[in-house]
Image (cartoon, coloured by chain):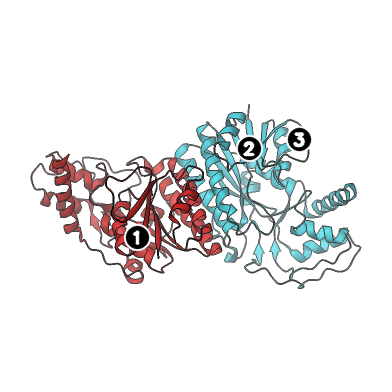
Chain colours: A cyan, B red
Amino acid sequence: VKRVLVTGAAGFVGRFALPELVARGYQVFATDLRPPAHEEPGVAFRTADLLAPGEPAGLLAWARPTHLLHLAWYAAHGRFWNAPENLACVQASLALLRAFREADGQRVTVAGTCAEYHWSAGGTCREESTPLRPATLYGAAKDALRRVLQAYAASSGLAWAWGRLFMLYGPHEDPGRLVASVIGARLAGREVALSSGEQERDFLHVADVAGALVALLESPVEGAVNVGSGAATTIRQLVERICAIVPEGPAPRYGALPARPGDPPRLVADVGRLTGEVGFVPRYDLQRGLEETVTWWRKSRTTR
Amino acid sequence: VKRVLVTGAAGFVGRFALPELVARGYQVFATDLRPPAHEEPGVAFRTADLLAPGEPAGLLAWARPTHLLHLAWYAAHGRFWNAPENLACVQASLALLRAFREADGQRVTVAGTCAEYHWSAGGTCREESTPLRPATLYGAAKDALRRVLQAYAASSGLAWAWGRLFMLYGPHEDPGRLVASVIGARLAGREVALSSGEQERDFLHVADVAGALVALLESPVEGAVNVGSGAATTIRQLVERICAIVPEGPAPRYGALPARPGDPPRLVADVGRLTGEVGFVPRYDLQRGLEETVTWWRKSRTTR
């Protein structure tokens, strides 16, 4: 039987990964700093601080996993880009990966990021050809972890894959992040203030992001694989879609905010590996994903 | 007053770095897993395991350093190339670097390695242009640490330099390593069995390696700097020099051993940054360095 340990299991992606793994027949062992808001059927949960000495070993003795889906990372909105906590996350990840392999773990999938890429390279990000030159400490830390994992996997016989996440959105998103904050403002009748909105991004519903990572864990594909939709959407197009779903309220003000320094004009995934090699097919297109997300936020507002 | 903390201070390079630092007016605080063979005048020493939780913080509270010379790494001869201990060394280094900066440390120099470079790139290794594509876990771990350090230094205002060490030799070398083992065999009248010996390498006396790292710490130069002689010497030329210094005994047998898989044909430093920007001038040429090393081994044999 396949046994999987999921870190960051109560997080934005983690909570959507758990039912996917149960559905695929895994025995699921989940961990996070804090317990999840609700219990997921068929999932054993244990709180753990991966930074605490001996904690990875304790988790592995408990779960005895054949598979590892490592999602845990420091993610405080706005702060994570250059926070020193990124160093601690590399440390914790290395300790966990080694303990996993030494406990006879077979295959790992880790959540990477489009921030590993050189943002000024332009074009569409391809795993094999776009230069890796992170502009942030977050991107550098993920990039460095992947490099060590690649060499460690080769020397220790560990199977590994690395999902590079692009933009994601969906239920339970941090209210400060883009899609959640725009929906929140529209539902409250507040004005939406934005930068120019001309930046092109690649949005994928969080349930599909989780599904893609699980598909990657299940597949024999090795190395880095972009996790995105493959479609370029400008921030303005995204906001206009949300405004069409929540039509009441003042028009969004583009250009009201300055561009974030270093914000790349285009950040879009080539998804050839994800669709061709992994065989992943998303369930949501952007329109339906946004509609369901708005519905979730409406419910969430009324039940609070 | 400048206060420097030296890790790996009882190691091959560390023991030569201590007197250099004292001579340059630093207050020197030194640490290693084990105490050094002899006390270095003017140096405060404390044993520490950098991997133990809280140990970096304890060392920093003790030394309160403005400068850090980080040399400690797993270095068991033959084993270090692909040992999982490399992961622990990245962890320990990240913990130390963050603790150093958060205790108001100003400038750090770390020992890197020519194993960070793509060994099949050919030519002479240049910091700015030779691709970084390590063939070993050791090289990948050092490369990854440097990448995180670069981003962390930028975001936290830490001054940093990274010395990429090529081949080194000299007194106190591990008897299993190349120069020490050839000298040992010659002095014992044993045959020296080698691979083809056609590989080109760059050899620098360990005292000069330590001197270069200290010069780098003292300088305002940022980023990676090769630490080598800049001269290409084949293994055969090296062995012939040693045989000329210790003429008694059987002729070396070239080709008696197979080439190590992946062993690069050429691994030579461009030292433009080290000599031009750092202004470092070595004290030893290869001939005098080998002569003094042979003299040291002769004495070391008779006093044991």
Kind of element beneath mark 1: helix
Q: In screen coordinates, is B204 left or right of B249?
A: right
Q: In screen coordinates, is B147 left or right of A22?
A: left
Label 2 belongs to which residue?
A: A218
Compare residues B227 and B118 and report the one nearer the observer.
Answer: B227
- Badge 3 amino acid: Glu
User: Marks 2 and 1, Cα distance to the nearest angstrom?
Assistant: 47 Å
At label 1, counting other C-alpha atoms closer than 10 Å, the crowd grade (few under 14, some 14-19, many 20 or more) is many
Q: Earlier in the sequence, mark 2 or mark 3?
A: 3
Label 3 belongs to which residue?
A: A40
Compare residues A33 and A70 and report the one nearer the observer.
Answer: A33
Kind of element beneath mark 2: helix
In front: label 1 or label 3? 1
- Badge 2 amino acid: Glu
Subunit ID for the residue under disc 2: A
In front: label 2 or label 3? 3
Subunit ID for the residue under disc 1: B
